[in-house]
Amino acid sequence: MDVPKGLAGVVVEETKISSTKDAKLTFAGYPVEELKDLPYPAVVYLLWHQELPTASQLKQLEHDLVASMTLPAETIRLMEYVALEPQHPMSILRTTVSLLGTTNNGGKLDEPRQILGKMLAAIAAIIRLRDSQPQLRVNPQWGVVENFMYLFMGRRPSAKQLQAFNTVMILHADHEFNASTFTSRVVASTQADFYSCLTAAVCALKGPLHGGANEQVFNMLQAIRHTGVAPQRYVDAQLAAHKKIMGFGHRVYKNGDPRAKILRGIAKEIAAETNNQVYFEIQEQLAAYMLKKLGLHPNVDYYTAVIYHCLGLDESTFTVMFAACRTAGWLAHIMEQRANGCLIRPASRYVGPTGRHVPAASTKLATERRKII
Ligand SMILES: CC(C)(COP(=O)(O)OP(=O)(O)OC[C@H]1O[C@@H](n2cnc3c(N)ncnc32)[C@H](O)[C@@H]1OP(=O)(O)O)[C@@H](O)C(=O)NCCC(=O)NCCS
């Protein structure tokens, strides 16, 4: 029996939420290219119900999400305590999500819409804590994306920023059985609670081969900018040292990530508006060289690095931003797994030694030790 490396191509469950079949990303059958400009909560509704919402359903969801974007004072206090020692925002998020699972509304379990609202509020709070800025309150007159941006940026976004970030959130909202989503489904398959599943998903997202790549992309762009090395030479040196170039390659998309194509346009525009063209130009040179040299295309994390930088975010917070966007998808998969799935418990092929027996001398020694104790 051949075991596919990293479960590549192995179908482990059925889903109605999203698909990457034929390298096309669809949510409940709709191409992401057609969804990218809808209001973000409409796509959240689609992922959770596999139908687009009516106007009143959309209004209700938006209202409920914004109403949930206020954290209990006790949670903020505990988060401040956790953040006392300088540490990576993803580590603070991992603890915070677990913490949220212990501060439900007076023993009443949170519903997915409350959980999503709290996750967005918590991630914005982590960014504010990192920047030693006071926490802000939502404005019930604004939508969920505008409120989220206000909470982490400290000011209302421009109309253009709002539209761009709305698209970023939609493009990241779900992606079939990626590593963090599959992790959340494994935990959900044991019928564990939502926050346990989300904590596990955050742990899986943290690594640089998954969500952690966007931070590494920006580190690379900065290294190239500050050393003045030609991007091509940077790539050659990294490859010679057997290192990967972050933001390139994908397990599913071998001819280009459809999300990266849309994000490239946003990155180009926002970089020009904020006088950050230098980073986008390095990206263009890197992308051309990577394609020529290795046949690898940029993935979703490549252009978001520049977009997040242009929104004023520190690179250490890029992956918590990915988590904010992906929470809607995680919740959709947790609900589907809990409703329809059974316990995920695969098998392994044992390749270690067999037929061994504990030598009599070791058994005798253990008996003597027990007598001494
Ligand atoms: C995403 C990723 C893990 C997918 O990997 P995969 O499907 O398991 O493919 P592999 O890692 O086996 O890559 C296949 C080949 O391409 C190479 N490769 C893949 N991505 C590469 C990259 N970013 N830089 C350099 N080489 C890369 C591998 O070294 C491997 O070469 P080999 O066959 O000579 O050993 C991989 O492309 C990667 O590590 N990318 C960088 C991290 C990243 O951007 N992650 C975010 C993903 S959205």
Image (cartoon, rainbow, N blue to C red):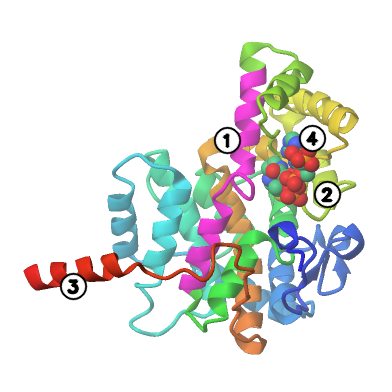
Q: Quadrant of the N terminus?
A: bottom right
Name the mark on residue 269: 4
The type of residue carrying mark 2 is Asp
The type of residue carrying mark 4 is Glu
Left of 91 or right of it: where is 211? right
Q: For the residues carrying marks 1 and 3, which lies nearer the camera in this image?
A: 3
Report whether the residue tagged 2 is closer than 8 Å to ligand 1: yes
Mark 3 or mark 2, earlier in chain: 2
Q: Nearer the viewer, residue 66 or 180?
A: 180
Return the residue at label 2: 257
Q: Judging from the image, what secondary structure is the residue with disc 4 in?
A: helix
> CB atoms at circles 1 and 2 under 8 Å apart?
no
Q: Quadrant of the C terminus?
A: bottom left
Specify few, some or many for label 1: CA neighbours under 10 Å numbering under 14, 14-19, or 20 or more. few
Mark 4 or mark 3, earlier in chain: 4
The residues colored magenta run: 195-224
The type of residue carrying mark 3 is Thr
The residue that appears at 84% across and 40% down in the rendered structure is: 297
Return the residue at label 1: 312
Instruction: Tell whether position 198 is magenta.
Output: yes
Query: What type of secondary structure mainly makes up the magenta span?
Result: helix
> CB atoms at circles 2 and 4 under 8 Å apart?
no
- Marks 1 and 4, how far apart at CA: 15 Å
Left of 110 or right of it: where is 46? right
Return the residue at label 3: 367
- Marks 4 and 3, how far apart at CA: 74 Å
The residue that appears at 61% across and 15% down in the rendered structure is: 226
Mark 1 or mark 2, earlier in chain: 2
Specify few, some or many for label 2: CA neighbours under 10 Å numbering under 14, 14-19, or 20 or more. many
* Residue 252 screen position, x and y as percent: 81, 56
The residue that appears at 72% across and 26% down in the rendered structure is: 239
Q: Quadrant of residue 173?
A: bottom right
